[in-house]
């Protein structure tokens, strides 16, 4: 997958053959990175993306931050996807 609006490690950018190997049918891959940017963004495949995006292989993800006081009255950050 290629992530728009999210700063991911280069090895998880989804450019098959360059930054990441293609995930073949029957295989799986777990993306592991911390999202620090709030906002509404989208993702899509980078393997034949011009065809796959037209066929609906893309999606949106929204990220926002909530603030709540902890037991000491200090502000803490809670992340939500």
Image (cartoon, rainbow, N blue to C red):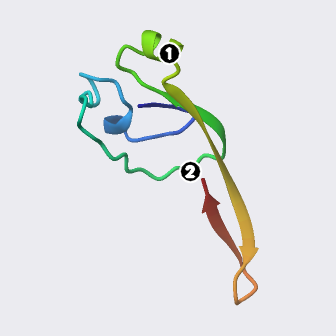
The N terminus sits in image quarter: top left
Pick the front one: 60 or 18? 60
Q: Within the image, what quadrant is residue 9 found in?
A: top left
Question: Which residue in the rendered view is the most extreme toward the front?
Answer: 26
Q: Residue at x 71, y 89 (%)?
A: 72
Q: Position of residue 44 (x, y in %)?
A: 48, 26
Q: Nearer the viewer, mark 1 or mark 2?
A: 1
Viewed as shown, does residue 50 lie left or right of 38?
left
The number of callouts visible is 2
Viewed as shown, does residue 33 lie left or right of 59?
left
Query: Disc 1 vs disc 2: Cβ atoms closer than 8 Å?
Result: no
Point out the tag, 1 or 2, that comes first from the N-terminus.
Answer: 2
Question: Which residue in the rendered view is the most extreme toward the bottom?
Answer: 72
Q: Residue at x 25, y 29 (%)?
A: 25
Q: Secondary structure at mark 1?
A: loop
Q: Position of residue 75 (x, y in %)?
A: 72, 75
Q: Residue at x 39, y 21 (%)?
A: 46
Question: Counting other residues with Cα less than 10 Å from the Cα at mark 2, is it few (<14), some (14-19), or many (20 or more)?
Answer: few
Q: Residue at x 30, y 42 (%)?
A: 29
Question: Counting other residues with Cα less than 10 Å from the Cα at mark 1, is it few (<14), some (14-19), or many (20 or more)?
Answer: few
Viewed as shown, does residue 81 lie left or right of 15?
right
Q: Secondary structure at mark 2?
A: loop
Task: Relative to 15, say whether 61 is above or below.
Answer: below
Numbered mark located on residue 7 in the image? none
Q: Position of residue 51 (x, y in %)?
A: 44, 10
Question: Circle 1 sits on which residue?
Answer: 55
Task: Relative to 31, say whether 15 is above or below.
Answer: above
Q: Position of residue 23 (x, y in %)?
A: 27, 31
Task: Relative to 27, say whether 72 is above or below.
Answer: below
Question: Circle 2 sits on which residue?
Answer: 36
């Amino acid at each position: 997958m290629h992530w728009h609006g999210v700063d991911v490690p280069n090895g998880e950018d989804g450019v098959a053959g360059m930054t990441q190997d293609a995930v073949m049918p029957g295989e799986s891959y777990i993306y592991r990175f911390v999202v620090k940017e709030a906002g509404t963004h989208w993702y899509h495949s980078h393997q034949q993306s011009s065809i796959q995006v037209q066929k609906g292989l893309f999606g949106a993800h929204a990220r926002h931050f909530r603030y709540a006081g902890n037991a000491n009255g200090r502000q803490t950050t809670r992340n939500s996807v």
